[in-house]
Image (tube, rainbow, N blue to C red):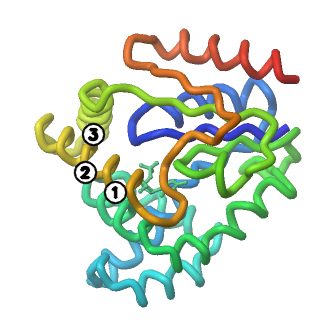
Amino acid sequence: MIITIDGPAAAGKGTLASKLSKKYNLAYFDTGMVYRAVGLELMLAGISPEDVEKATDFAQKLTFQRMNELSHHSEFRSANGGKYASVVSSYPQVREALLQMQQNFAKNPVFADGSKADGAIYDGRDTGTVVCPHADVKLFITASPEVRAERRYFEFMSRGHQALYADVLEDIKARDKRDSERATAPMKPAEDAVIFDTSALTIDEVYQKAVKIIDSKQ
Ligand code: C5P
């Protein structure tokens, strides 16, 4: 089984994907990681995210192993890391270079310890439309920018990062705009995706709702 969960930043995709991956024994691919990894390569090399050529070069060379190494860096999930990721993800050449790697994951889905999974679950912006257009279940999770900024703000705080709520909100709005207005693979629900707004729902309510949808499609 392949499940895709798309939607804007901090809508709760990652939390939901982790819970569903356990319930259905699915290997989880957080596809934002590929763009964060390319963004961080640029940041570490002191190169501007506006450098399309260098960004494409890093994207073409990215491996799973390198991505996992970079994911331990403190800037990987920082606000600045998110900004770099959002900028590099708007380049069609970068997206093209990273597509195969994402699609290959579903061909032989395995957990981090190498054991075989019963399928794959993806989260991102275009996993139901571009990465896995033939997925069995597609979800599109959203929430108001204010609710998402609050969630992201508390996430930063719990990681020991400094942030201001107003800055986080502004950043979320800028990322939404960039993600949904870019020419290649813009963030949008697949035609056959089930859309739900999590603004007024608890994590457990979102999870129960998703389980019902998945079980009804199986
Ligand atoms: O989900 P996350 O915040 O980690 O993603 C980082 C950035 O990568 C997003 O702001 C978005 O611009 C980009 N992204 C994307 N397509 C995906 C996943 C993430 O463009 N499938």
Describe the element under mark 2 as helix, strand or loop: helix
Q: Quadrant of residue 18?
A: top right
Give the quarter of the figure containing the N terminus.
top right
Residue in the picture at 24% in, 34% down = 153
* Residue annotated with mark 1: 178
Q: CA distance from mark 1 to mark 2?
A: 6 Å
| Amino acid type for the residue under numbered disc 3 | Phe
* Residue annotated with mark 3: 156
- Using a 10 Å C-alpha cutoff, classify the residue at mark 1 as few (fewer than 14 neighbours), some (14 to 19) or many (20 or more): some
Picture layout, residue 204 above or below residue 96? above
Picture coordinates of residue 147, whole percent (x, y):
29, 24
Describe the element under mark 1 as helix, strand or loop: helix
Picture layout, residue 90 above or below residue 152? below
- 39 or 191, which lies in front? 191
Q: Are marks 1 and 2 in contact (CB under 8 Å)?
A: yes
Q: Which mark is residue 174?
A: 2
Left or right: residue 107 versus residue 137 is right
Residue in the picture at 73% in, 52% down = 132
Q: Is mark 1 within 8 Å of ligand 1?
A: yes
Residue in the picture at 25% in, 51% down = 174
Q: How many marks?
A: 3
| Amino acid type for the residue under numbered disc 2 | Ala
